[in-house]
Amino acid sequence: MAEPDSPPEASRFDPVFLNARREAWLILMAWAVCLIWTVGYSAVAGYGVAYEEVSIILGMPGWVFWGVLVPWIAATLFSVWFGLSYIADDDLGADEDDEASHG
Amino acid sequence: MADGANPALVMFLLYTLVVFALAWFAHRVLSKKAFLSEYFLGSRGLGMVALALTFGATSASAGSFAGFPSLIYAHGWVLALWIASYMIFPLCGMGLLGKRLNQVARKTGAITVPDVLRERFESKALALISTLLMAFMLTIYLIPQFTLATLIMEQLLGEAALYQRAAMGLASVAGGLMPGGVSAEYVLGLLLFAVLVVLYTTFGGFRAVVWTDVLQGFVMIVGVLVMLVLALAQVGGLPAATQRLAQMTPPRLGEVVFETPIPAPATGHRIPSDTWFTLADETTSALRLFRINQPALIAPGDTRSAAIKAVEITTPQEIADMLGRFETGAPPPLPARVQPRLVAMAEYVHGAGRKGVYVTAPGPSATEADGFLPLGLAVSFFVFWALSGTGQPGNMIRLMAFDSAATLKRAIASLSVYFALIYFPLVIIFCCARVLAPGLDQTPDRIMPVMAFLLSDGAHVPWLAGLLIAAPFAAAMSTVDSFMLMISSSVVRDVYQQNVNPQASERTIKRMSYACTLVIGIVATGGALYPPQFLQYIIVFTGGGLAVAFLGPMTLALYWPRFNKTGALASMIGGFLAYLALYIAGFVLYGGTSPVRPLGFDPLIWGFAASLLFAWIGTVATPPPPERLVRKFFYREG
């Protein structure tokens, strides 16, 4: 069976499918980056630390600030950019039922 | 407090009126459009605000506003890590499947999730299995949602004299019919909630559910942001709260009995819940400070109460501060000659006597030796929230209902900001709650309403409590209505219309849909009359099970042309059974609700891995799908 990655086949595939698949890969990569950043940083700076060593930044433990709040802000900004600018504005087609009832 | 002045009651009545008005308008729209598509999918016409808020409100169940705050209160700042994957959930939940699922649903005229699977694979068996699995799991899921909503309702209305009179009336009329172990107040709250939610869902369909979700979405965010400002103001700023948390050591939890040397008088002795008392330490003669988390009663003629839950504060600074809040420097005295006697007090298994456990990971735990959130579980939860949310059929159905890609794009952006403004502030608010309302560690599920009243009273704005408590109630309601409608759509569309009576008239379908929504509401109400234990575990188990069963098959169905019917069936059944097996193994080995977690990872991760593995094996071991199906779903038209 033809796979959509082979160049001659790509033109036969539905552009909504190809766009959505490309966007899905990027979303999975963004999720993986968030996982590594958040859990990775927290593992190093938040686990097994004596309370005297915990810094406080903007009123919260430093590891929460750098390991959760900052990536959360970054992920939100990325999501806003991704939603508003990156996702292709594809035509998703008409509803089959509507077509049937109108036509 | 007089009925008319009860702010919570007034707020609740206003809220109910608005919900019914929305259902009435939705019903008017429904009468002008094709029934099935409108009733179950709002004619695929959701705009940006509706899509973002219905997705957000449905995802934020009662657990977000009852269970999550209680966990923050009990374990501190580590909950920021526990919930952290909500930072990326809107992008995953809407962006991963949204556009393709909406396109495929339009192409096939699908209005339910099993509809999509049946059309994609031309398999009635797959649709039927997925319908049964979904209906079964969602009905179980509804029961704890009804129970949690009723508990919130009791908190919301319990102090109103009208409510108490109605409950007494119910007890006198139907007391003999009530199940053991539940109060008349609980049954009344359950009936009120059930009638409200079943009526407007049945009457208004998907559009009513979405419109009320939008209302509830606004109520939730306003409630959270107002609480945030009040909590920070009353605690003296976040740095002060975190510094206090850093000094805290976990409390001791146990039981206490109240005794009197002479039998109690005809009125008995009643010691209200949350009463403070002190005892002198036998060796050092220092003061020990306790708070009871349940009311105690010494019945007339008796000399002792039953054993009730109590919490001992262990941080010297906290004890001094708390005693300083009392006018006399000591808790108000107990009734004359009544003395407390400790039955048992236990230390936390992880974190006892250690400062800093509330500001570091893995967080203190009364029962787990490795602490609340060991690293393996932190990874699991990061995977869990994003994947579990994406795989929920309740979220998928919303992705089939929006009107254009432009709507999806704006909804992803809006929901990302919305969740950031709800979940991280909740962590801050309930870290402050540890400082503002100490000693509730044995009944932390009450912390949300307790904080609502505390913050409102502190700000001298008592009516605000009604709004703040309406937020968790709205969260429960928006989840329940969506799931009821989804179960009935699956049963009517995928079982009745596809397998029993394909020629059913619109009139028959309409009656079936109304009846089905009503019956599901009644079944869930009946289940909640016997409130199950371990509510949060049922929610986690059913939510995870649905995600494991649906995420793999749906994702591959949309993105892998070679994926076939056998692979989809193997993925759905294999993933779910692997997930279920780890829970059954946990029950057999540990005798409780904790599943087996190989390598420290949650069953959802293993179930999802099994789902993908079975999908691959099932697909490559059998012939490819028919070329016309691949052309239909993956190729350009024409």
Image (cartoon, coloured by chain):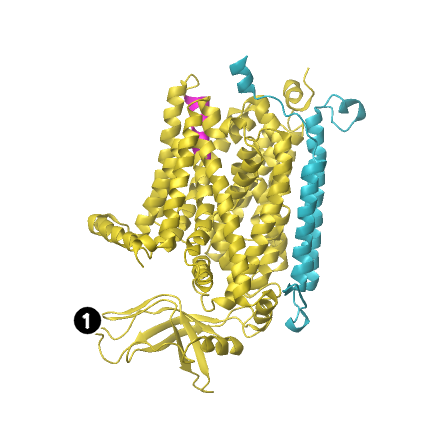
Chain colours: A cyan, B yellow
- Provide residue B258's location: percent of width, then percent of height: 32, 74
Q: How many marks?
A: 1
- Provide residue B438's location: percent of width, then percent of height: 47, 68
Q: Is residue B552 left or right of residue B192?
A: right
Instruction: Give B587 or B110, whichever is nearer the viewer.
Output: B110
Q: Quadrant of the C terminus of chain B?
A: top right
**Residue B328 image-quadrant placement:** bottom left
Q: Is residue B309 left or right of residue A86?
A: left
Q: Residue furthest top?
A: A103
**Relative to B396, does residue A38 appear above or below in the rendering?**
below
* Secondary structure mostly taken by the magenta-highlighted segment of the chain: helix
- Residue B237 among those drawn in magenta: no
- Residue B497 among those drawn in magenta: yes
Please report the residue visible at 59 percent of the width from the left and 31 percent of the height from the top. Answer: B568
Please report the residue visible at 46 percent of the width from the left and 26 percent of the height from the top. Answer: B493
Instruction: Work out whether residue A17 can be spotted.
Output: yes
Instruction: Work out whether residue B532 can be spotted.
Output: no
Please report the residue visible at 50 percent of the width from the left and 33 percent of the height from the top. Answer: B130
**Relative to A16, does residue B593 appear above or below in the rendering?**
below
Q: For the residue marked with disc 1, what is the amino acid? A: Ala
Instruction: Give B70 or B352, whichever is nearer the viewer.
Output: B70
Q: Residues within 10 Å of mark 1 (few under 14, many from 20)?
A: few
- Provide residue B181's location: percent of width, then percent of height: 30, 55
Q: Residue furthest right?
A: A7
Q: Which residue is mark 1?
A: B266
Please report the residue visible at 62 percent of the width from the left and 53 percent of the height from the top. Answer: B84
Q: Quadrant of the N terminus of chain B?
A: bottom left
- Chain to which the residue tagged by mark 1 belongs: B
- Provide residue B320's location: percent of width, then percent of height: 49, 79
Write the start and end of the magenta stretch as one range.
B486-500
Instruction: Give B52 or B599, whichever is nearer the viewer.
Output: B52
Secondary structure beneath label 1: loop
